[in-house]
Amino acid sequence: MQLYTWPTSPFGAKVWALAIATGLNAQITKVPYHPWQTDPELSKLNPLNKIPVLITPDGEGLYDSPVICEYLIEQSGKDELLENKWCNLRQQALADGIMDAGVLVRYETHFRPSHLQCQDWLNRQLNAIHRGLDVLNKENLTDTLTLGTISIASALAYIELRKVCDWRENRSQLSNWYDTIRHHPALEQSKPTDCPLPANLIKLRE
């Protein structure tokens, strides 16, 4: 199998952590691919031109990350990763929403020239992130790896990497939980990491 992803992608990090947790990572080759690259390879695999994309042994392309995660759980038989299914899916959805907003903040502040940035748009994303984090701070989160906890840890790792906001302030329960679970090998080996951008990258209009 092949996994098209990028080292900074929180969604790719989530999928890779789950691959490690299921034991299927040894069967997967990671293909570094940034969704803003100008060649059309990714759009042939995913018409939305987004990562991650998993190519199955049958040559089928799966996207997006929740679909890939359920596929890996089903293929591995590690149903315990999705035990209490609706709780896990809800936690994943909340974490994915935080990731979405975090990536949008990153793109707006890092790639778009300052005179084109929209503060109202940034505030909308940051408010969504903070509301989500406040809910997670009240959750009774387990230190066991599940689809939900992997998703949440991947979101927090990205927010921390990109310094999107000070997510730890007034959230001691969530902060303490993360400082425990982030040392799990699956999360340490998959956390989003910074890297140089590829040369063939579409740039925002200046």
Image (cartoon, rainbow, N blue to C red):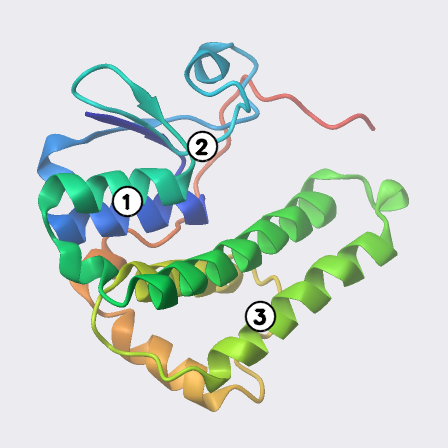
For the residue carrying disc 3, how many other residues have a C-alpha within 10 Å: few (<14), some (14-19), or many (20+)?
Answer: some
Estimate the spatial distance between the alpha carbons at disc 3 and disc 1, rounded to whole Å: 23 Å
For disc 1, the marked residue is 70
Q: Residue at x 52, y 80 (%)?
A: 168
Frontmost of labels 1 and 2 is 1
Asked if residue 183 can be seen in this view, the reply is: yes
Residue 29 picture location, percent across and down: 20, 28
* Residue at x 48% of width, y 60% of height: 95
First along the sequence among labels 3 and 1: 1
Q: Residue at x 34, y 81 (%)?
A: 177
Q: Nearer the viewer, mark 2 or mark 3?
A: 3
The amino acid sitting under disc 3 is Gly
Quadrant (top left, top right, bottom left, bottom right) of the C terminus: top right
Question: For residue 51, which numbered disc appears in the image?
Answer: 2
Residue 176 drawn at (x, y percent): 37, 85
Q: Secondary structure at mark 2?
A: loop
- x, y percent for residue 139: 43, 82
Q: Amino acid at mark 2?
A: Ile
Element carrying mark 1: helix
Q: Which residue was labeled with disc 3? A: 132
Q: Secondary structure at mark 3?
A: helix
Badge 1, how many Cα within 10 Å: few under 14, some, many 20+? some
Label 2 – label 3 distance at C-alpha: 23 Å
Residue 152: name its quadrant.
Answer: bottom left
- How far apart marks 1 and 2 lie (CA) works out to 16 Å
Amino acid of disc 1: Glu
Where in the figure is residue 40, as x and y percent of width and height? 51, 10
150 to the left or right of 34:
left
Which of disc 2 and disc 1 is earlier in sequence? Answer: 2
